[in-house]
Image: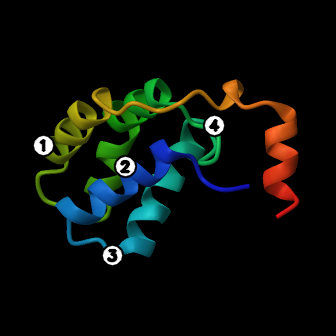
Amino acid sequence: MADSVVFNFVCERIEGLTTLDRLESRGTVRSALKTAVLEARTVTADQMGVVVKRVLVSELVNRGIDRAEAHCLTIEQQLATLVVGSPSSETPQAVFERLGR
């Protein structure tokens, strides 16, 4: 199953704001989610907001990223404006049709 839009959004922001490359930023966010006992494919915007605020800052500091708190605040603000369709609004038939492609 693919990663959530929210996960990809945060990873792209980290990659753009820091010196971390794509793989490093995705690993950093996955580590933060693991600490919060959440998964990249199902994390919601609200859940990710808490992870960014409470866990991601320390993950970035541990990786030597300057201005980690400021970057996380920026991501948190951008995340609050992200509009994501609810995964539960998709019908089972639509899921199976997509998987059958």
Rendering coords of residue 86 (x, y %): 59, 27
Mark number, residue 70: 1
Rendering coords of residue 73 (x, y %): 19, 36
In this view, the mark in front (3 or 4): 3
Crowding around mark 1 (Cα neighbors within 10 Å: few <14, some 14 to 19, many 20+) is few
Label 3 or label 4, whichever comes before in sequence order:
3
Q: Residue at (39%, 72%) from the top-left corner? A: 22
Rendering coords of residue 39 (x, y %): 64, 44
Residue at the disc numbered 4: 37
Q: Residue at (37%, 49%) from the top-left corner? A: 10
Q: Amino acid at mark 1?
A: Ala
Residue at disc 1, secondary structure = helix
* Location of residue 57 by image quarter: top left
Residue at disc 3, secondary structure = loop
Residue at the disc numbered 2: 10
Residue at the disc numbered 3: 21
Above or below residue 57? Residue 59 is: below
Label 3 or label 1, whichever comes before in sequence order:
3
Q: Amino acid at mark 4?
A: Val
Crowding around mark 4 (Cα neighbors within 10 Å: few <14, some 14 to 19, many 20+) is few
Q: Amino acid at mark 3?
A: Asp
Calculate the distance from the C-alpha at mark 1 to the C-alpha at mark 2.
14 Å
Indicate how the structure is coloured in the image.
rainbow
Q: Amino acid at mark 2?
A: Val
Query: Which residue is more in the foreground, 25 or 83?
Result: 83
Label 3 or label 2, whichever comes before in sequence order:
2
Calculate the distance from the C-alpha at mark 3 to the C-alpha at mark 4.
24 Å
Crowding around mark 2 (Cα neighbors within 10 Å: few <14, some 14 to 19, many 20+) is many
Label 1 or label 4, whichever comes before in sequence order:
4
Label 1 or label 2, whichever comes before in sequence order:
2
